[in-house]
Amino acid sequence: MAQVNEHVHEHQEATCWELLQEVKDPEIPVISMVEMGMIHKVKVESGVAYVEVLPTFVGCPALEIMKKNISEKLVEGEGINEVQVRFVYDPAWTSDRIALDARDKLKSFGIAPPPVGFQPGDTWEVTCPYCDSPYTTIENLFGPAACRSILYCKHCKNPFEALKPIY
Amino acid sequence: MGELLQVETAQEALKNQEYTQALVDLLFQLADDDFILAYRGSEWLGLAPHIEEDVAFSSMAQDMMGHAVMYYEMLEELGVGKADDLAQLREASAFRNAILVERQNGAGGYNDDPHYDWAYAIVRSYVYGLHKKVRLESLLKSSYSPLTLISRKMLTEHRYHLMHWQVWLKQLANSTPDARARLEAAIAKVWSDAGELSDLGPNAASITGFGLIEAEATLREVWLKETQAIFEAANLSWPGEPGAAKERGRAGEHTADLIQALATLSEVYRIDPAASW
């Protein structure tokens, strides 16, 4: 019986991960929270889904919206009666957690993805998401969301945003 | 202390009354510093020198407010009270922030002919930020594991604040004589309070004894060394040993500025604590 339960839970957890692909980052609607690398763990026990989420920024005002969206989505899953979302800080979210294929989606949305494998002391060089020119300048380290900066492309003359390297 | 214990959870901390007391005392200092300076930052909204700065300053205030929330939630976990109540319903004498962070932004009031001092905003934010970095780095080795985890996260955000203030400091220091004179006046004003930042309060011996954070002298030494290097790189003369206000914020002594800040920030919450935002 225990083994059967185990099997059911595994199946339900897989369903949860699939459903979570549909929960988008409220401030970047082209990529999911799974692709952002924000979902750390999903566990299902007796109809309750426990989800551990890694915040990108501690004071991000979108966190409560994310919590609500996750809960509303997962109760659609078969046998899920309750959802408990918890924010955890171990491991710390870093921008390297963003899925590689999600980086192209960010570009298509006009947001330059963060560099991969950024180290302290590295120079943050950003290429334009529209024309790929490296001839860009930072207009403001701080943008419309805590995780983004505002830049300008001197080649195609477009303003754009970039996700900050968080490392 | 020879053998330091590592405490993983609030429940574990609560088994030792003295440890809990030291932890609570430290958490109030961390929370109140960030909370009150974030509030002062929010009072710049719409008043910063240009629109990009308005966005930047409010982003940083929002980050700091988020950090304060984390500390208040840790206090809630330790059974001290509800996080929102701790932030909004305590009297000034229960606050443990340093006097530096509670000072008004300048002459006038936010709604009453503000003549705020931008140079003071830069220097206060930067000097505080440099100290906060040293404090967070020390907390990475704290005996209270939840503090080490959250410090790691806060540092990733905080480094962008430092970069921002670094740019302002350098530019103003190397700008017109007027800019430089204002900057120097702001440094003198900040410096007369800044010494209190590394004060760990009346219970300091217990806080450091339990390995929650390094000793005041260590924090102070690292902070002053790093700040001095930055001042020198910006071609600013070193103001020497920092002073402290006559009130000791870490012991609950505060100026009328904090009373004003608390009355304003908690006005709505006191009218209707059940209001949802």
Image (cartoon, coloured by chain):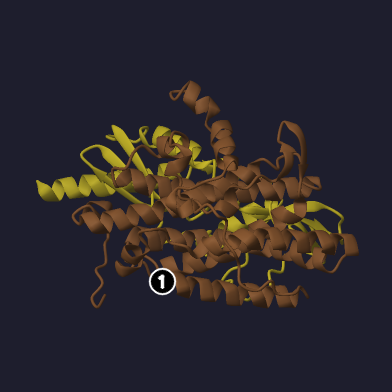
> Which picture quadrant has residue B173?
bottom right
| Quadrant position of the N terminus of chain B in the picture | bottom left
Q: Taking B53 as reference, is A41 left or right?
A: left
> Which picture quadrant has residue B128?
bottom right
Q: Residue at x 27, y 52 (%)?
A: B10
| SS category of the residue bearing label 1 | loop
Q: Taking B142 as reference, is B243 left or right?
A: right
Q: x, y percentage for residue B93? A: 45, 42
Q: Residue furthest top?
A: B271
A160 vs A132, nearest the viewer: A160
Q: Taking A131 as reference, is B55 left or right?
A: left
Q: x, y percentage for residue A95? A: 55, 61
Image chain in yellow: A
Return the chain for callout 1: B
Q: x, y percentage for residue B263? A: 55, 32
Query: Residue tagged by mark 1?
Result: B215
B75 vs A161, nearest the viewer: B75
Residue A157 appearing in the image:
yes
Q: x, y percentage for residue B52? A: 77, 49
A100 vs B217, nearest the viewer: B217
- Against A25, residue B121 (above or below) is below
Look at label 1 and name its amino acid.
Answer: Ala
Q: Residue at x 62, y 67 (%)?
A: A115
Residue A31 appearing in the image:
no
B151 vs A71, nearest the viewer: B151
Q: Residue at x 50, y 58 (%)?
A: B154
Q: Residue at x 77, y 64 (%)?
A: B184
